[in-house]
Image (cartoon, rainbow, N blue to C red):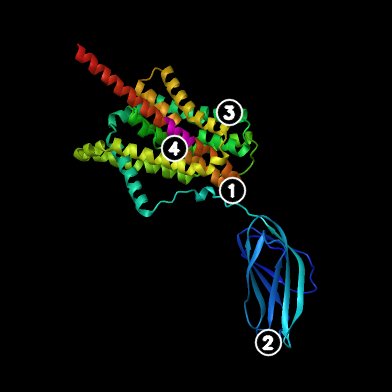
Amino acid sequence: QSGTGILEKIKFFLKSDLDKTKVLLYTKTEEALIVRSSYKSNGPNSSYLSVYLEDLEVAQVVNVTKMSSEVMNFKISLLTKREGETSLIIQLWDSVGGQDRLVEEIKDIQIKVIFKPKTETLLQAPLHFDSSALMLILPMILLNKCAFGCKIEVETLQIAWKKPLPILLGGAIQFFVMPFCGFVFTRILALSQALSFGFVMTCTCPGGGGGYLFALLLEGDITLAIVMTCASTLLALIMMPLNSFIYSRMLGLHGSLHIPVSKIVTTLFFIVIPISVGIIIKRKVPKWASYLEKIIKPFSFVLMSIGIYLSFRMGLMFARTINLEVFSLGLLIPALGLLFGYSFSKMFMLPLPVCKTVAIEGGALNSFLALAIIQLSFPQHKAELASVAPFTVAMCSGCEMLFMILLYKVKKITALNEDEKLNSFV
């Protein structure tokens, strides 16, 4: 009887009336074969089993043990060495009158050894934190968001809602311009259906929670960044299902797509609640708010570094599938979001901090929402292929934003030094 290669024990009944040729498939380095016979031996220890392998380079018999003294059950332990085929001969012997007698024999049992590499699925991505590390990072994130809430001016918040042009520009870029660009570029590069859908879904994601972090470090409008992130996350409840339906049909994917509504709502609450606490602290306990505002920049740098590190760590498992086209598109998507956001804002003659904020919201995408849609909507093999897109975009956007921040800081320091030299000269 042929085995599946999944079970550790493959049962084989030793009977002389069975077909002579059997095929056993092995996919692991250690395998066990259970042999049973209906033969009644003369004594409890008089019978034994002989096993012969033709090619010892493919597999080797480690030992043969009798599982019960009363029942003719034997366990054959095999050690597979390399891929290939070999034949197995099993003989059942019994000692009668001091002489060994062959009772049953099966020849030409074909053994195939196929090693299947263990691929780590996306849901088993290498995020192996101990509890102490997790307990350290989560409070830092919540405290940092609370500190951002302390920097929000209620008057500025009211102005942002009364003049919603930047919010409308950000929404148009995130849910209309970017998905269309993603679709066009995946068609130009002739990517597979699953991978194309992964990129389109990444392009239709709302702004990530790091948007206002980058706005702080690049001296954008922090209040506007927070409002835009919350607004785009709320709008994603409508636009992500709509875009996934439209572009999946355009890509020829006619399956049922599942939108992670709970994850989107959780993301929204994860932003709104700690920031609201920060706003209340500023109004009720201004002294605490001043202390919290001082930790924003160091905490932001630490969390940004952790985020980039995690993106790379998870993305490394897809490194073998990231070719030049995929990597180029991963670099292009966040760069396009930045470019569109800044250019459109300049067209409407918005202030420079607002232009920076709209650009950041267009380029810093919440790729993990796209990942959730992919994992819920595709079978494993397609999900792993499509998941390359959000991970590549997450890695590239993190590096691009970090490069922009470093460049901005260097430029600012250089400008200050020049001003000091000029003042000293005067």
Distance Cα–Cα, label 4 vs label 2: 79 Å
- Looking at marks 2 and 1 on the same chain, the residue that comes earlier in the sequence is marked by 2
Circles 3 and 2, Cβ within 8 Å, touching? The answer is no
Q: Is residue 20 left or right of residue 264?
A: right
Label 2 belongs to which residue?
43
- In which quadrant of the rendered view does residue 378 lie? top right
Res 135 seen here: yes
In this rendering, is residue 191 above or below 128?
A: above
Distance Cα–Cα, label 3 vs label 2: 77 Å
Label 4 belongs to which residue?
234
Name the mark nearer the viewer: 2 or 1.
Answer: 2
Q: Is residue 426 left or right of residue 2?
A: left
Name the mark nearer the viewer: 4 or 3.
Answer: 3
Q: Residues within 10 Å of mark 1 (few under 14, many from 20)?
A: some
Depth order, front residue of 227/3: 3
Label 3 belongs to which residue?
185
Secondary structure category for the residue under label 1: helix
Name the kind of residue labelled 1 in the image.
Gln
* Prevailing secondary structure of the magenta residues: helix
Q: Is residue 176 left or right of residue 51?
A: left
- In which quadrant of the rendered view does residue 199 lie? top right
